[in-house]
Image (spheres, grey):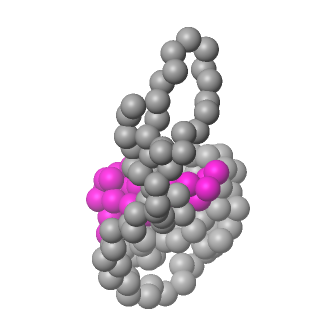
C-alpha cells in the first residue's frame, strides 16, 4: 500500500492506495480514508504598491512588440509606461485556461507603450506591449 498526502481546496488528506494487479480495479478501503489534516499556514505575500492604470497606446516605430503567445485575459501589469526592463523581467500576467502565465520581456529596454487595457481578452499574436 502506498501512502499519499493530497490537498483539495486547501484541505490536506492522507490516503492509502493499494494496487490490485491485473485489470485496473478501484475499491476504496474504509481504512484508506482518514480525517483531514490542517494545511500548513502560509505567510501572505506583501501587497505591491498600487501602480497607476496603464495607458493604452498605439504602436511605436522601431520598438519590439510583445505579442500574446496564447488566447487569454490580461490579469495584471507588472510594469508601467516608461519603466526600464531587462530581458526575462515579468511584464504582465495573462490568464489562459484557468492558469496565470507570466509574460516576460524578450529584450532589454523601456516600456514604450501598453497596447491593451487590464482585463482585456486577447488572441494569439495580439500586440500587448512595446519595448523600445
Query: 79 or 63, which is in the foreground?
Result: 79
- For the point 38% across and 84% down, which residue is it? 47
- For the point 33% across and 73% down, which residue is it? 42
Give the image location of residue 54, x and y in percent. Answer: 54, 79
For the view shown, which residue lies furthest in the top direction?
Answer: 22
| Left or right of 104, for residue 117 | right
Q: In this orientation, does residue 112 appear?
A: no
Range of the magenta residues? 84-109
Query: 10 or 29, which is in the foreground?
Result: 29
Give the image location of residue 104, x and y in percent. Answer: 41, 55
Give the prevailing secondary structure in the magenta stretch.
Answer: strand
| Left or right of 86, for residue 39 | right
Query: 77 or 98, which is in the foreground?
Result: 98
Q: Quadrant of the C terminus?
A: bottom left
Q: Is 17 above or below relative to 94? A: above
Count of marks overlaid on the render: 0
Q: Is 12 above or below relative to 55? A: above
Residue 101 sits inside the magenta stretch = yes
Amino acid at each position: 500500500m502506498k501512502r499519499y498526502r493530497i490537498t483539495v481546496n486547501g484541505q490536506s488528506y492522507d490516503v492509502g492506495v493499494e494496487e490490485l494487479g491485473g485489470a485496473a480495479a478501484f475499491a476504496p478501503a474504509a481504512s484508506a480514508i482518514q480525517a483531514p489534516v490542517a494545511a500548513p499556514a502560509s505567510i501572505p505575500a506583501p501587497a505591491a504598491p498600487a501602480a497607476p492604470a496603464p495607458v493604452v497606446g498605439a504602436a511605436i516605430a522601431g520598438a519590439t512588440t510583445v505579442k500574446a503567445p496564447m488566447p487569454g485575459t490580461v490579469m495584471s501589469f507588472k510594469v508601467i509606461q516608461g519603466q526600464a526592463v531587462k530581458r526575462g523581467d515579468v511584464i504582465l500576467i495573462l490568464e489562459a485556461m484557468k492558469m496565470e502565465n507570466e509574460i516576460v520581456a524578450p529584450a532589454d529596454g523601456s516600456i514604450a507603450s501598453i497596447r491593451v487595457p487590464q482585463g482585456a481578452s486577447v488572441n494569439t499574436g495580439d500586440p500587448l506591449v512595446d519595448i523600445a
